[in-house]
Image: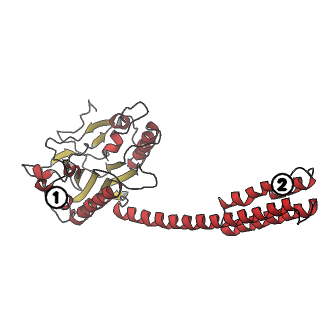
Amino acid sequence: MIAVVTVVDIVAPPEVHLGPFLVAAPAITASFAGPRMTALVGATAVLAQVTVAVTRTSLTDLNHTLQIIALALIAVMATLFSYRRERRERQLVQLRSVAQAAQEVVLRPLPRRIGPLRLASVYLAAEAEAQIGGDLYATARTTQGTRVLIGDVRGKGLEAIGDAARLLGAFRAAAHRQPELPALVAFLEDAVSSDLDTPGDWTDGMDGLEAFTTAAILEIPDQTATVSLINCGHPPPLLWARGKVCELEVRQPAPPLGLTGYMTTPFSKQEFTILDGDIVLLYTDGVTEARNSKGDFYPLAERLATWAGQGPDALLRYLRNDLLAYVDGNLGDDAALVAIERIGAPHAVPPARPCPSDSST
């Protein structure tokens, strides 16, 4: 650009002055290059303007002198701008790397294989540049099998991340120490409610009721096909069994964690049968409450029923792409999905199955 403007300005008629166009060179360079390159381009533009002045008139010509001074000042300002932009970019890269490391510590990637299970997980954050919000999931190995947690913290932002980290830390600390699933959930309830005021101390209306977490906790033994589930106000998991889809609906669901102080009975688990090849899909309400442009909710169970069946990784790829296409890439809330496939369960079919072969949901 500098070369073209210089040549055209030299051969142009005396009343035509194209020198001001040289200002664009350092200005454009500052938007993508570093200060050294910006300074070099600015100096080249000033030199080009000097060449035009000497060729057409002289350096003492007032018009060209003012153009050279203005161009030099703008080149210096563009260089300073490029320096500040580059420094801010380095700070942003450092902050993003720290944030990514912190997010990976809070929400650790699930193993692809654990015991007789194959797992896959997807986290879709509604907030740009975020990789974690109020949704959470985790797994833990015990002497008898695998325990899986999925939850959704009420709220968004840093506060929700802190509550999610507290619950995940409690689960990882106690999942292999509490022999009974109800005792584990009671421990998680204590961890969630430890920072909450008692109901009698609430002074902000209903604000105290907003500090809760919905959660579903699964216990999957290695040696049997019986799976135990405690649901604390969370959307019921879906079971894909031989192309049929149904909900693992518990008869006595518990309130969300943080609100179970109102329970009059202890936590109770319900058992389901999960056979070899069955897939359990855990999810948060950010999936089922996602809306398209018409305001319709995402039909998760229907979309799961149309899936051909090629393992948990393929399932979540299918659901992720389908969900983002359904909402045109604009999620209103964080969304998490965890798919669990049994690959070593007993093959004998018990009398009671969650998904009868002649019906689906």
Residue 28 position, x and y percent, is 70, 57
- Residue behind mark 2: 5
Kind of residue sitting beneath label 1:
Asp
State the separation of the CA atoms marked 2 and 1. 71 Å
Indicate the quadrant where residue 236 lies. top left
Instruction: Describe residue 158's horizontal placement relative to residue 213 as left or right.
Output: right
Q: Tell me the crowding category of disc 2: few under 14, some 14 to 19, or many 20 or more residues within 10 angstroms, Cα based.
A: some
Quarter of the image that includes the N terminus: bottom right
| Outermost residue toward the left in this view | 264
Instruction: Describe residue 261's horizontal placement relative to residue 93 as left or right.
Output: left
What element does badge 1 sit on?
loop
| Outermost residue toward the front in this view | 62
> Along the polypeptide, which appears first: circle 2 or circle 1?
2
Residue 132 position, x and y percent, is 38, 56
Work out whether residue 53 or residue 145 is closer to the camera in this orientation and state it: 53
The tag on residue 295 is none
Indicate the quadrant where residue 279 lies. top left
The tag on residue 197 is 1
Q: Cβ–Cβ below 8 Å for labels 2 and 1?
A: no
What element does badge 2 sit on?
helix
Indicate the quadrant where residue 157 lies. bottom left
Residue at 47% across / 39% down in the picture?
328
Q: Tell me the crowding category of disc 1: few under 14, some 14 to 19, or many 20 or more residues within 10 angstroms, Cα based.
A: few
Residue at 22% across / 55% down in the picture?
223
Instruction: Describe residue 14's horizontal placement relative to residue 247 as left or right.
Output: right
Q: Is residue 219 visible?
A: yes
Work out whether residue 121 or residue 255 is closer to the camera in this orientation and state it: 255
Kind of residue sitting beneath label 2:
Val
